[in-house]
Image: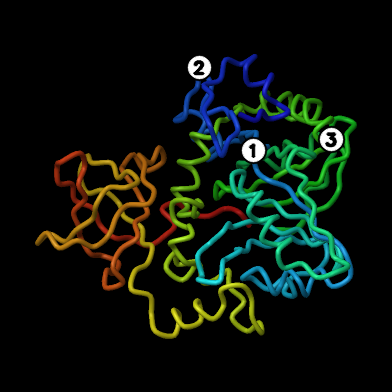
């Protein structure tokens, strides 16, 4: 199992560790736990080690055109110095991975895929790459540190960082004496930043940020809180809302598809699915009783007709109620009351509009 360059920092705090995509990563820290860590991000600020996320580069003349022929979104919509959420599909429209693409120039892109899918992303790109373009796996070359919450700008400013950048913009900054790529993005629904220092500099950048968040009541947070935060926003997680068996159209992620592009991997299937209408789609569900939706639970009508299953579910620390995302028959609509099977007991849920919590990313 791989270790983050900040692994020793987590052990020193006696973090509860678990496997994430082949990486041993912190779930929560003693003395706080998921609920407190979640609350810190919603109300103040939290710092996450997400170094298990992949990193790769695509460089060379024609890199923009090549990536636009591979990814669903249109990189021509953003300028240099901006990042974009996108997906890499196979020919059948299944999602190999969802990722963030950083555009340095038309000939230089930096990619941040999911941990367990990095090898597949790089292999798929290399299987189609034309001469003159180089795809490089940089998974262990960089750490990734996320600083999220309403006090994140003040924390960054205290470290001498210019925070007056647009949402999804990135620039190079210096923190703790180290060069860092800083992007105004995140996975929590709060205003925040993701920072990419070189692996050798990860510890001093981490220490500088931790020292800056503690005086304002910030917490070091594990991936348990990251999951409850992203579920409250309805953000998809690969292997749950997105997979080789679940297309972006079914996952209600059509906003990340450049429909006007000439084509990309899986585009014919996705355009056909859009035109004909998907038979199933992702929706948000909120518990009407004490039941808590969990991934894999079956969903049905009050009359017992099967509709699909929960793909992600949790207890919402903010709303104090069970919430989830479910892949259900396309006939389901907002306001419908449905039944989930919670360990053999029927529990009532209502289909609601996402996000569960207001977004503050901008």
Q: Quadrant of the C terminus?
A: bottom right
Q: Are marks 1 and 3 in contact (CB under 8 Å)?
A: no
- The Cα–Cα distance between marks 2 and 3, rounded to whole angstroms, is 28 Å
Residue 164: x, y in percent? 78, 53
Residue 196: x, y in percent? 77, 42
Q: Quadrant of the N terminus?
A: top right
Nearer the N terminus, badge 2 or badge 3? 2
Between label 1 and label 2, give the one nearer the viewer.
1
Say which element carries label 3: strand
For the point 32% across and 52% down, the residue is: 310
- The Cα–Cα distance between marks 1 and 3, rounded to whole angstroms, is 18 Å
- The Cα–Cα distance between marks 1 and 2, rounded to whole angstroms, is 21 Å
Nearer the N terminus, badge 1 or badge 3? 1
Say which element carries label 1: loop
Between label 1 and label 3, give the one nearer the viewer.
1
- Residue under circle 2? 31
- Residue under circle 3? 175
In the image, taking residue 14 as reference, residue 103 lies left or right, namely: right
Residue 257 vs residue 170, the one in the foreground: 257
Say which element carries label 2: loop
Q: Are marks 2 and 3 in contact (CB under 8 Å)?
A: no
Mark 2 Cα-neighbour bin, 10 Å: few <14, some 14–19, many ≥20: few
Say if 239 sits above or below 80 in the image.
above
Residue 237 vs residue 354, the one in the foreground: 237
- Residue under circle 1? 50
For the point 75% across and 38% down, the residue is: 140
Nearer the N terminus, badge 1 or badge 2? 2
């Amino acid at each position: 199992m791989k270790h983050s360059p900040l692994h020793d920092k987590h052990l020193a705090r006696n973090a509860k560790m678990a496997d994430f995509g082949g990486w041993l990563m912190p779930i929560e820290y003693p003395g706080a736990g998921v609920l407190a860590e979640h609350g810190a991000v919603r109300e103040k600020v939290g710092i996450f080690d997400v170094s298990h996320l992949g990193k790769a580069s695509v460089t060379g003349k024609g890199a923009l055109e090549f990536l636009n022929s591979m990814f669903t979104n249109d990189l021509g919509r953003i300028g240099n110095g901006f990042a974009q959420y996108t997906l890499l599909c196979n020919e059948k429209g299944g999602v190999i991975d969802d990722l963030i693409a950083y555009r340095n120039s038309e000939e230089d892109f930096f990619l941040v895929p999911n941990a367990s899918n990095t090898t597949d992303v790089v292999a798929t790109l290399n299987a189609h790459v034309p001469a003159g373009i180089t795809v490089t796996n940089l998974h262990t070359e960089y750490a990734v540190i996320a600083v999220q919450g309403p006090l994140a700008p003040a924390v960054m400013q205290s470290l001498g960082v210019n925070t007056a950048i647009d949402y999804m913009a990135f620039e190079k900054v210096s923190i703790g004496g180290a060069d860092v790529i800083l992007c105004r993005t995140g996975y929590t629904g709060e205003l925040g930043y993701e920072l990419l220092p070189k692996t050798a500099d990860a510890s001093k950048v981490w220490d500088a940020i931790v020292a800056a968040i503690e005086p304002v009541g910030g917490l070091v947070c594990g991936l348990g809180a990251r999951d409850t935060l992203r579920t409250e926003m309805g953000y998809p997680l690969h292997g749950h809302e997105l997979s080789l068996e679940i297309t972006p159209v079914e996952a209600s992620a059509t906003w990340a598809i450049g429909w006007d592009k000439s084509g990309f991997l899986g585009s014919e299937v996705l355009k056909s699915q859009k035109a004909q209408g998907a038979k199933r789609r992702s929706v948000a569900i909120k518990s009407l009783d004490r039941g808590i939706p969990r991934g894999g639970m079956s969903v049905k009508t009050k009359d017992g007709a099967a509709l699909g299953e929960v793909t992600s579910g949790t207890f919402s620390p903010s709303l104090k109620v069970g919430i989830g995302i479910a892949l259900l028959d396309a006939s389901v609509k907002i306001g419908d009351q449905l039944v989930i099977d919670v360990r053999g007991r029927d529990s009532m849920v209502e289909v609601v509009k996402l996000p569960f919590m207001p977004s503050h990313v901008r």
